[in-house]
Amino acid sequence: MLALMVIDVQQGMFGGVQPFRGEAVVARIAELLTRARAVQVPIFFVQHDGGPGDEFDPDGAGFPFHPAVAPLADEPVTIKRRNSGFYQTDLDDKLKAAGIDALVICGLQTEYCVDATVRSAFERDYRVTVAADAHTTFDSELLPAATIIAHTQHIWNGRYARLKAADEIVFA
């Protein structure tokens, strides 16, 4: 069974410097959520806890989800403290209990939490599709965000995941 996974689309990602095409990515994720909910595809959210004093401190303004993509009351949220949504969390147990064997993954940041979760899902034998235009990151000191995204997608494609544009993903 297929599920949608939304990774770290939190307020702290939109505080100062904005992610590359951030609002367009959020709009695509919101549309994926709408379409998945319409056909009752399970949705799993992953949320980063950076600890006290971090921009993703659970008691801070950066921890909540972006309001355009916030989970509904009955949609599970996995709190993580490392890059991968699977590392020392109950995410794998939640997915298995729901009968999930395939994932559509979207979110932030491409080369960190999205990448680690994509690879961890692959290692656990989930069939992974990445919504190619529904994840993003920031420019780094070495590379612009567009290059980071292109490079990461090149590594994923056909190895760890399939890539599909968000509007080409069919939830059925």
Image (cartoon, rainbow, N blue to C red):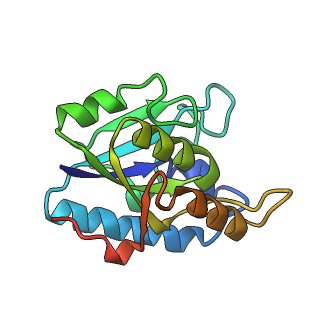
Q: Position of residue 89 (x, y in %)?
A: 42, 25
Q: Tell me what residue is drawn at x 20 percent, y 60 percent.
A: 37
Q: Residue furthest front?
A: 159
Q: Tell me what residue is drawn at x 79 percent, y 57 percent.
A: 140
Q: Tell me what residue is drawn at x 28 percent, y 27 percent.
A: 93
Q: Is residue 130 left or right of residue 92?
A: right
Q: Tell me what residue is drawn at x 62 percent, y 46 percent.
A: 112
Q: Residue furthest right?
A: 141
The quadrant where residue 154 appears: bottom right
Kindly tell me whether residue 6 is visible in this rendering. Answer: yes
Q: Is residue 42 left or right of residue 138?
A: left
Given residues 154 and 88, the one toward you in this image is: 154
Q: Position of residue 116 (x, y in %)?
A: 55, 42
Given residues 15 and 81, the one toward you in this image is: 81
Q: Is residue 93 left or right of residue 82?
A: left
Given residues 23 and 35, the one toward you in this image is: 35
The quadrant where residue 125 appears: top left
Kindly tell me whether residue 136 is visible in this rendering. Answer: no
Q: Position of residue 90 (x, y in %)?
A: 35, 26
Q: How many marks?
A: 0
Q: Position of residue 108 (x, y in %)?
A: 55, 54
